[in-house]
Image (cartoon, rainbow, N blue to C red):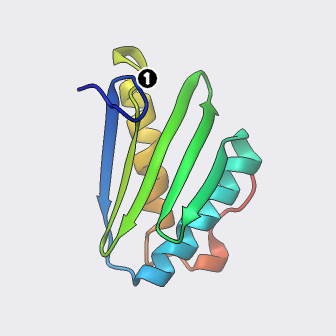
Amino acid sequence: MTDKLHGDNKLTIQHQHALSDADAQARMRVLGEYLEKRHGITVSWSSPDKAVFNGKYLVVKIKGDLLLSPGNVTFAGVDPGALWRRKATEYILGKLKKYLDPKIALADLPRAG
């Protein structure tokens, strides 16, 4: 599928959660801090529920939008191709699961690598 926004193939990852909107937003901002400090991935928030990610994890380019909606988080970005798709999906989904886990207190989530 071609993504008109990014011009490349699109990778879409969704994760459902049971957090309040405010808690989910706060946790995604902490995830953004972590990604910037750990991997140099820039995170720009255009509104309380939308961010743009741009950078690399290992050799995988991560470029896309994160959209928060009630009970759901969606990452829509550039597909890194067949070779790296699984690694990128596992990394992004793993981070969403961890940072949106209600069993982990917001204060206990990593902010730096």
Q: Residue furthest top?
A: 83
| Place of residue 92 in the rendered image (x, y in percent of width and height, measured from the top left) | 45, 45
**Residue positioned most to the front:** 4
Residue 26 vertical position relative to residue 74 in the rendered view, above or below: below
Q: Residue furthest left?
A: 1
Q: Is residue 7 left or right of residue 59?
A: left
The amino acid type of the residue labelled 1 equals Pro
Query: How dense is the environment of label 1, judged by Cα within 10 Å: few (below 14), some, or many (20 and up)?
Result: many
The image position of residue 68, as x and y in percent, is: 40, 66
Q: Nearer the viewer, residue 18 or 2?
A: 2
Residue 49 percent across, percent down from the top left: 46, 68
Callout 1: helix, strand or loop?
Answer: loop
Q: Which quadrant is home to the N terminus?
A: top left
Q: Position of residue 88 (x, y in %)?
A: 44, 33
Residue visible at 49% across and 81% down? 23
Task: Out of 17 and 110, give the one closest to the viewer.
Answer: 17
Above-or-below relation of 56 to 16: above
Q: How many marks?
A: 1
User: Which residue occupies 32% across, 78% down?
Assistant: 18
Left or right: 110 with respect to 72? right
Of the pair 85 and 75, the residue shown nearer to us: 75
Decide if residue 14 is on the left or right side of residue 93.
Answer: left
Q: At 71% from the left edge and 62% from the top edge, which residue is drawn?
A: 111
Residue tagged 1: 80
Q: Nearer the viewer, residue 89 or 46?
A: 46
Q: Quadrant of residue 16?
A: bottom left
Is residue 113 found left or right of 105 in the rendered image? right
